Amino acid sequence: MTSSDAIVIGGGHNGLVAAATLAKAGRQVLVLEAGSEVGGAARTEEFAPGFRVSSVAHLLNRLHPDVVKTLELGKHGLKVTRADFMPSVALSRDGPALVLHGAYGEVLTGASSSEQSAWNALRAQLLRYAGILKPFLSRRPPDLAGMSLLETASLGQTALALKKLGKEDMRDFLRVLLMNVADLLDEQLADIRLKGLLAFDATLGSHLGPRSPTSLLGLYYRLAGETGSAPGAQILPQGGMGAIVAAIRAAAEKAGVIIRTSTPVARIIVENGRAVGVTLDNGEVLRAGTIVSAINPATTFLGLVGPREIDTGFVRRVKNIRMKGDVAKLNLALDRLPQFTSVDAAAHKGRLVIAPSPDHVERAFNPSKYGEFSPEPVMEITLPSLADPSLAPSSACVLSAVVQYAPYALKDGWAAGKPKFLKAIMAQLEAHAPGIGKSVVHAELLTPADIETRYRMPGGHWHHGELQADQMLISRPVSGWSGYDTPLEGLFLAGAGSHPGGGVSGAPGLNAARRIIAMKG
């Protein structure tokens, strides 16, 4: 039996951030990762001989600046400049593409001058409103039952920020906060290509369509994140997302964190209502004063702790967390660079989005409500080997795409459905990049069921739970327990299922570690 100050379960990026932050505060920290590598769904993996790709998450767009600063990631290989910002390209079958340049559309090309003016006004409004929500996504949610002086002051600052908007803007903020994204876009824009791109971005990763109530929140969530100090900016890291994980791991190990891979945890040991250690699959017992779970909340409580150790009301709320994924990941090994029509060489290095209009996105969403997929799925495509040739053999290319909507519980089952879904995806790609099918050396399609199995994510949901209004802020992961504490003393949550949610931000891990440090001194 060995002892540490803290044991972190799960070596994904949030677990590593929590471990590094605790270690820098003087704690002796042990990370236990069930897989053979750390990084979780942000690893860079070989999926065909000579071809490597970011496993599920394939773009960096919200790594929290406090994580970068606290862990000094710049000293461990992280480099982000404005030159790395990727354009967002709205593909069209009927004409030229529309392109958002810089940090999420600082410059718009391919649209009329009137549309560019309308977009500039809407973008400024979205950034102002996302800025109101941003502080909530950057720190521990307030404890409404017993707010500290600091939490009360923070809410006061938010109220002041709202007041600074002015009467008209404040009224409009409250009006649109829970709107669906399609209605807002219809109010202010005319170009269906631009509206389709924004509708896709607002709903990516959620079981929502553009006309679903509250779908606008997804766009605010995206714009509340930042890269290189620029809201909405996104990059393809050299070496894939695994390079970000490598920088965080290096920071953790420099701080003294011990990492054990291929070490599954079988059980969290609870004594007299307190978490005191873990039992590994091999029977080894490890004890610690603090247990930090950076894995899915349902796995933590229903699997590792067990319902007997917590009250039935809490168990019921955990069981009711909606976490059935709706996104598939496609990795293609190509023997040559694909040519997307009406897209220049610079745009090929961006994120290419097939979402021709909000109505198309809505039609793609509708079948998923009934356990089916659309024959014309919407998707976000990157060609990472253009930015980093080491990811593919010479003259070859890697294509990475996240595809909506792929229901976790497909009515016909994924064994029969996967080949059909792949065929539908390839038909969409072929329509925009003629001849791409003939260049495919190997195709890997990961459905939510595959993602669940490979990356130990219940439901295959990359946010570890739907990121919707009733599962955000003070209700994440469940109402009453949103501040990383749990009903068990000594056990804390630090994964994407905690506030503020998924994406490679590191915020849940950082906030959880700060909470532990504040509580334990």
Image: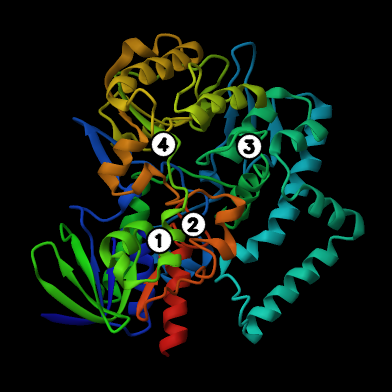
Task: Indicate the amino acid at tag 3.
Answer: His
User: Picture coordinates of residue 283 (x, y %)?
Assistant: 9, 67
Task: Indicate the amino acid at tag 4.
Answer: Ala
Characterize the local packing of mark 4: few (<14), some (14-19) or many (20 or more) Cα atoms within 10 angstroms: some
Q: Quadrant of residue 307?
A: bottom left
Characterize the local packing of mark 3: few (<14), some (14-19) or many (20 or more) Cα atoms within 10 angstroms: some
* Residue under the point 41% across and 57% down: 78
Compare marks 2 and 3 and give the one earlier in the sequence. Answer: 2
CB under 8 Å between callouts 2 and 4? no
Q: Is there any visible trace of residue 296 in the rendered image?
A: no
Q: Quadrant of residue 115?
A: top right
* Residue under the point 37% across and 57% down: 298
Task: Indicate the amino acid at tag 2.
Answer: Leu
Q: Quadrant of the N terminus?
A: bottom left
Q: In this figure, which residue is indicated by the disc labeled 4?
A: 387
Q: Quadrant of the C terminus?
A: bottom left
* Residue under the point 37% across and 15% down: 423
CB under 8 Å between callouts 4 and 1? no
* Residue under the point 44% across and 47% down: 323
Give residue 101's mark.
Answer: 3
Q: Is residue 313 left or right of residue 92?
A: left
Q: Quadrant of residue 144?
A: bottom right
